[in-house]
Image (tube, rainbow, N blue to C red):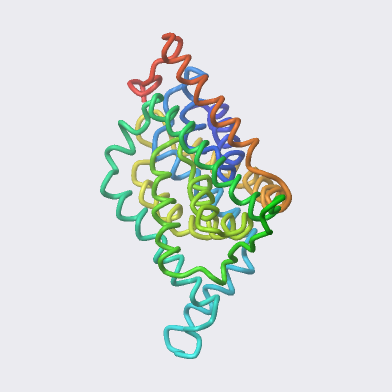
């Protein structure tokens, strides 16, 4: 991998990690369209450490408060009813599904799941799911001629059941094209949470999973065509761009719909199917060389 490739892929990672359009799919597609080698699951996981560092800084006050309350709750029974302490436990519980499934399906994640036809399918299907979830949220928030405005849930109403459902939604993102934020936000909206609550928990829930995945994949960094230097460079690029994107996205969702992302996903998925079907792009483009 050249330094230019690592710059572009780091930029793509930072731009797409927090948007509901799938960063892993876009890394895979960028390499395929450019005629580069597939950067691979290890490169993707390690560069995600950069974007999660952006989450740690952006949500630093929330994270410090949650971690502090969680540790206190281990020895102080009175703290166990504290919302922040409960959030700590819910993030742990919600991280279990992706941890178990990530280890179980490691070979599939690094191989068959990177087929461009599967990515096209998940882009379209999850785009439709996000669109339906967003539409239901908008209906509750605005009401209608014969429907009263319905109050949606905040994170204070999050329990173990919903936390696990969020966790299984996050685990779906092991398949490129699903999108970690897209799946968890869609799940949250379908469970009746506000856009802001679903997005905030989605980002907090991703921290332990992504950091653990990145550390786990460190052993494979530097193998094949992806060297350590370009991987680290891409990670720093992803961090800087990711911080800007997350700040913008959290403001965007307070007033805007997810429909632009829905339309983009569906169009990209259809285009990908068309290119593969026409023979202009191999479903395994770049894999053999990687």
At a point 72% along the width and 50% down the height, the residue shown is 145
Q: Residue at position x 45%, y 90% from top?
A: 77
In this view, 63 is above or below 270:
below
Provide residue 239's location: percent of width, then percent of height.
60, 47
Q: In the rendering, at what x and y percent does residue 166 appear?
A: 45, 57
When the figure is inspected, residue 46 is found, relative to residue 73, above or below; the finding is above
Residue extending furthest toward the front = 146
Task: Tell whether 269 sits left or right of 41.
Answer: right
Quarter occupied by residue 39: top left
Give the residue displayed 58% in from the left and 39% down from the top.
16
Q: Residue at x 34, y 55 (%)?
A: 99
Who is closer to the viewer here, 82 or 146?
146
Q: Is residue 99 above or below residue 72?
A: above
Please indicate whether residue 196 sits to the left or right of residue 111 in the image. right
Q: Residue 227, position in %: x, y?
A: 43, 34
Residue 130: x %, y % from top left: 54, 42
Quarter of the image containing the C terminus?
top left
Number of numbered markers? 0
């Amino acid at each position: 991998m050249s330094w230019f490739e690592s710059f572009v892929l780091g930029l793509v990672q930072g731009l797409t990690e927090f948007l509901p359009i799938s960063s892993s799919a876009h890394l895979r597609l960028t390499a395929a369209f450019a005629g580069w080698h597939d950067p691979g699951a290890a490169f993707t996981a390690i560069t995600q450490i950069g974007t999660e560092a952006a989450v740690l800084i952006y949500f630093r006050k929330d994270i410090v408060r949650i971690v502090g309350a969680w540790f206190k709750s281990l020895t102080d029974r009175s703290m166990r009813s504290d919302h922040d302490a409960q959030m700590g436990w819910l993030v742990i519980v919600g991280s279990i599904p992706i941890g178990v499934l990530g280890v179980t399906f490691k070979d599939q994640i690094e191989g068959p799941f990177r087929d461009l036809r599967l990515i096209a399918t998940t882009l379209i299907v999850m785009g439709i799911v996000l669109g339906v979830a967003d539409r239901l949220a908008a209906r509750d928030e605005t009401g209608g001629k014969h429907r009263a405005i319905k109050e949606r849930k905040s994170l204070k109403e999050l329990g173990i059941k919903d936390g696990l459902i969020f966790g299984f939604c996050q685990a779906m993102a092991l398949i490129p094209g699903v999108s970690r934020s897209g799946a968890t936000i869609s799940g949250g909206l379908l469970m009746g949470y506000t856009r802001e609550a679903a997005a905030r928990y989605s980002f907090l829930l991703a921290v332990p999973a992504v950091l653990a995945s990145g550390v786990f994949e460190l052993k494979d960094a530097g193998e094949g065509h992806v060297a350590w230097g370009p991987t680290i460079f891409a990670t720093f690029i992803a961090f800087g761009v990711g911080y800007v994107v997350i700040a913008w996205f959290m403001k965007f969702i307070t007033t805007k719909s997810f429909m632009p992302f829905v339309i983009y996903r569906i169009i990209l998925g259809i285009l990908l199917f068309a290119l593969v079907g026409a023979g202009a792009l191999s479903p395994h483009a770049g894999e053999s060389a990687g």
